[in-house]
Amino acid sequence: MMLQQEVDIGELLMHHTADAYALDFSPFFVWNYGKFIPDIHVLGLTINLTPSKHAIYMAFAAFLVFLTMWTAGRTLERQRAGEKAPKGFANAVESLALWVRNDVAIANIGHHGAQFAPYIMSLFFFLLYCNLLGLLPWGASPTANLAVTGGMAILSLFVIELSGIVKLGWRGYMKTIFPPAPGMGGAGAAAISVAMAPIEIIGKLVKPFALCVRLFGNMTAGHFAILALFGLIFLAGNLEVWRWGIGAASALVVFFVMALELIIAFVQAYVFTLITAVLIGVIVHEH
């Protein structure tokens, strides 16, 4: 019972999943840098500018996206200059980028999809790296933070709605909020349009909310499952007969869960970008 008292599974889960002003590379070192940038107070609001662990890993994910594209681009230039077919890492990145461009962006947005392809491709690769960083030793997944997924969803909401305003014009866009009533006119049609407006506005807000919660929930659940299974090893440490069997079984299950998490990292990045592309396509073709 002594080992059970020493290991707090709840604290273990929160320590490895919650955001913090520290980078944990145990057992080598732990850098608790704290809040080193003074807060800014604006109109009664406190703005914290100190980058947290998840913010640092977000910046690292963005750097990895740049490094991946830059390396693949330079390699493709050299291969094509020598009249060679793309191969290796550059070929894999090009194939994945073209798939996102053609089968996600253009296929779902339509003939305007090429205009949105850079955003859709950047969104996919950024989310993919954010998801994968949480599977590395000492890593952290920024997409397991509700603020991060919420920020990405709000960004997609702005892109979707601004695309509708640019494509449809202000009057056409307002019809997506105050839809006309077919077959009716006068005061009755106006009353129905006004009555439908709250539902249309809620519909616009629910879509990015679903994007936010889906990505956050899937990435957080996987980390909790892995850490909880590892916790079984500590809890079974005092069982002389069963501890090796429980430890081996837990490690085996964790291996398969990690493999599943690798698939989920790709799937969730794909789902987020796919739904964003679909919603852009819906509003630009509203007419």
Image: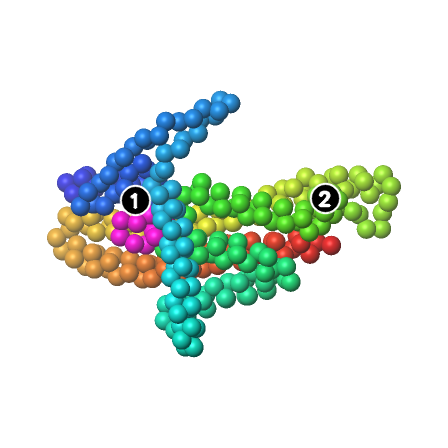
Verify whether residue 137 appears in magenta: yes
* C-alpha distance separating marks 2 and 1: 47 Å
Identify the residue at horizontal 40%, vertical 75% (top origin): 82
Q: Where does the C terminus fall, quadrant-wise? A: bottom right
Residue 92 in percent (x, y) is at 41, 68
**For the view shown, which residue lies furthest in the top direction?**
44
Residue range in magenta is 133-142
Please say if 14 is above or below 34.
below
Please say if 205 is above or below 44.
below
Identify the residue at horizontal 16%, vertical 49% (top origin): 237
Q: Where does the N terminus fall, quadrant-wise? A: top left
Please say if 81 is above or below 283.
below
Using the image, tell me which numbered label, if any, was put on residue 131.
none
Residue 31 in percent (x, y) is at 24, 39
The amino acid on which the numbered mark 2 sits, given as a three-letter code, is Trp
Magenta: main secondary structure equals loop
Verify whether residue 39 appears in magenta: no
> Which quadrant holds residue 14?
top left
Q: Earlier in the sequence, mark 2 or mark 1?
A: 1
Lateral position of residue 31 relative to residue 172, left or right: left
> Which residue is nearer to you in this view: 25 or 180?
25
> Which residue is nearer to you in this view: 172 or 134?
172
Q: Residues within 10 Å of mark 2 (few under 14, many from 20)?
A: few
Report the colour scheme: rainbow
The amino acid on which the numbered mark 1 sits, given as a three-letter code, is His
> Which residue is nearer to you in this view: 131 or 201?
131
Residue at which label 2 appears: 170
**Can residue 10 be seen in the rendering of this structure?**
no
Which element type, helix, strand or loop, lies under badge 2?
Answer: helix
> Which residue is nearer to you in this view: 188 or 73?
73
> Which quadrant holds residue 200?
top right
Residue at which label 1 appears: 16
